[in-house]
Amino acid sequence: MSSTAAPLPGLTLGSLHVDTPVVLAPMAGITNAAYRRLCAEQGAGLYVCEMITSRGLVEGDQHTKDMLVFDDLETIRSVQLYGSDPVYVGKAAEILCAEYGVAHIDLNFGCPVPKVTRKGGGGALPWKRGLLAEILEAAVAAATPYDVPVTMKTRKGIDDDHLTYLDAGRIAQEAGCAAIALHGRTVAQAYSGAADWDAIAALVDHVDIPVLGNGDIWEAADAVRMVEETGAAGVVVGRGCLGRPWLFRDLAAAFAGERVATLPRLGEVTAMMRRHAELLCHHLGEERGCKEFRKHVTWYLKGFAAGGEMRRSLGLVDSLAALDRLLADLDPDEPFPVRELGAPRGRQGSPRDRVALPEGWLDDADGSGCHVQEDADETTGG
Ligand SMILES: Cc1cc2nc3c(=O)[nH]c(=O)nc-3n(C[C@H](O)[C@H](O)[C@H](O)COP(=O)(O)O)c2cc1C
């Protein structure tokens, strides 16, 4: 499928420019060096690392260091940082710039996981406007001497009665952030319902810095539509690319003015699976690489005829040789299941009745100097 439309410009974040206004959403447990490389092989974009914690980085935590691995071909190192303490965040930003040569730092203020919001972190934190400003200012102050742009990623708010995104946009702009990314859901919604693109448009109207729109982009055409409908400077794509790295090919084409929907036959999908597993094994060793690969199997095969026994075996794969044997049994000519186009994938879940928050959290909307406990081993994220 292909037709032509007017080309749109790339994405500029401070000193950084990428040719396509497309950002791979940071996804814990997914967007490691192997996955970023796999996606980058498909098309231009900004490919953000899994979230790491400021405390973990500052305290030299081994797990954190293990996550800060980049592929040799990764020319733009982009890292998402989690933090609720301005001092740790500032130090972590300094380390990322000075020791890891990063070109972009994104700060995560959208995590809906109760374990995180219960302490006032993640998506709960922007309620404390003063504290949010302190954190962003600390990161910008540390990154500016290195000319590294800082962005923030957030949700609409805690729930419909406690929206924070417009204030967060203003605060991010005043703090010197290069952009703000908005996932058009509240923390209470988690991943349920539909992303509110009107909120993205409202944020675009509210701030002068670039806004990156996020939520429910399943196809390249959705991304173009989001930009056209909201005025966003670019898009952040998460679940839509699970088991479909070629979506980045379609996205790059779409923003170059070409409408392309890649419909790979099963043979091309298995080649992509093999490439993904190979990259994971390259970065993590064969045993861990294969184990990590297992979680991607159902996404790659979604809608294809591969039977339960095959899926189960692939879900237990422990070597590249075993993977090759199994993939060889799949019919390479099976056409792409087009009914999957535009369909949600990945986690969806249900809304929460109540967001877990610290006692009295909503009573004060400033929170300057307030202490929010941050664990070094926080690994959830979005
Ligand atoms: C498995 C998974 C892990 C995620 N981890 C993070 C994370 O570490 N940091 C973050 O900011 N968002 C995280 N998110 C949220 C995504 O970045 C994104 O905001 C969300 O999925 C909505 O975009 P989508 O509709 O394109 O998926 C995660 C989402 C998923 C599905």
Image (spheres, rainbow, N blue to C red):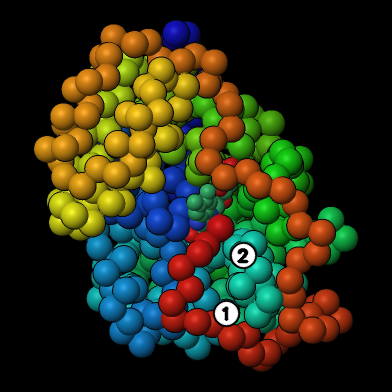
* Label annotation for residue 113: 2
In the depicted structure, whether residue 343 falls above or below residue 375: above
Mark 2 or 1, nearer chain start: 1
Q: Which image quadrant for residue 152?
A: bottom right
The answer to whether residue 152 of the structure is visible from this angle is no
Camera-side residue of 298 and 2? 298
Left-right relation of 177 to 358:
left
The answer to whether residue 45 of the structure is visible from this angle is yes
In the rendered picture of this protein, how many numbered marks are placed on residues?
A: 2
Circle 1 SS class: loop
Give coordinates of residue 287: x percent, y percent.
18, 54
Give coordinates of residue 204: x percent, y percent.
69, 47
Q: Which quarter shows the N terminus?
A: top left
In the depicted structure, whether residue 175 falls above or below residue 32: below
The residue singled out by tag 1 in the image is: 84
Residue name at image x 33 percent, y 41 percent: 315
Q: Which quarter shows the C terminus?
A: bottom right
Q: Name the residue at the front extreme.
A: 309
Left-right relation of 301 to 174:
left
In the depicted structure, whether residue 97 falls above or below residue 303: below
Give coordinates of residue 177: x percent, y percent.
55, 65
Q: Amino acid at mark 2?
A: Val
Give coordinates of residue 176: x percent, y percent.
56, 68
Camera-side residue of 205 and 376? 376
Q: Name the residue at the left extreme.
A: 321
Camera-side residue of 196 and 113? 113
Circle 2 SS class: loop
The residue carrying pointer 1 sits among few (fewer than 14), some (14 to 19) or many (20 or more) residues within 10 Å by Cα, namely: many
